[in-house]
């Protein structure tokens, strides 16, 4: 796994508006990168976005980070992730 990548070459820069994307570490900053990479995803572009993450992280890491993040990830994205990996469904927000 690479230590440093320019994450804005993979995902829209506006998702990381408050940080220097060239200084993000794939290993150390996974708690930032994973949820923000999926923040603006929809059913239509989920496949493309999740594949980019899968090139960086295992599905176990992706699920673990999303289950515990404080970022504003929609329940729809959580459902898409749990369906993709056949994991127990999880929600960020209870209705």
Image (spheres, helix red, strand yellow):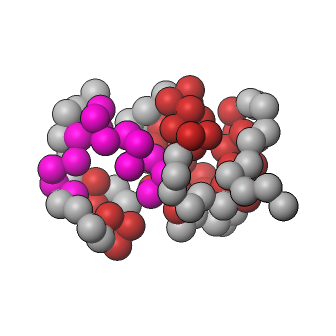
Q: Position of residue 81 (x, y in %)?
A: 67, 44
Task: Give the quadrant of residue 31.
Answer: top left
Residue closest to the eye, 47 or 40: 40
- Taking the view exactly as shown, the residue that stands out farthest to the right is 95
Q: Is residue 49 visible?
A: no
How far across and how far down the image is residue 67, in percent? 61, 40
Position of 3 relative to 6 (above/below): above
**Left or right position of 76 against 24:** right
> Magenta region: which residues?
21-36
The N terminus - image quarter:
top left
Please tell me which residue is depicted at 44% across the width and 57% down the height of the picture. 36
Q: Position of residue 94 (x, y in %)?
A: 79, 55
* Residue 29 lies within the magenta run: yes
Instruction: Residue at 50%, 30% (x, y): give it.
Output: 61
Quarter of image, res 56: top left
> What residue lies at 38% left-to-right and 49% top-to-bottom?
32
Left/right placement of residue 22 relative to residue 65 reads left
x, y (%) of residue 13? 31, 68
Q: Is residue 6 magenta?
A: no
At 22% from the left edge and 32% from the top edge, which residue is drawn? 2
Q: Main secondary structure of the magenta part?
A: helix
User: Quick check: 22 left or right of 68?
Assistant: left
Q: Quadrant of the C terminus?
A: bottom right
């Amino acid at each position: 796994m690479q230590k440093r990548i320019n994450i804005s070459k993979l995902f829209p820069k506006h998702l990381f508006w408050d940080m220097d994307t060239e200084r993000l570490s794939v290993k150390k900053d996974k708690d930032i990168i994973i949820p923000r990479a999926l923040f603006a995803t929809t059913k239509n572009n989920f496949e493309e976005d999740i594949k980019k993450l899968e090139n960086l992280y295992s599905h176990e890491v992706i699920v673990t980070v999303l289950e515990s993040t404080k970022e504003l990830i929609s329940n729809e994205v959580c459902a898409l992730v749990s369906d993709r990996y056949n994991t127990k469904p999880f929600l960020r927000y209870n209705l």
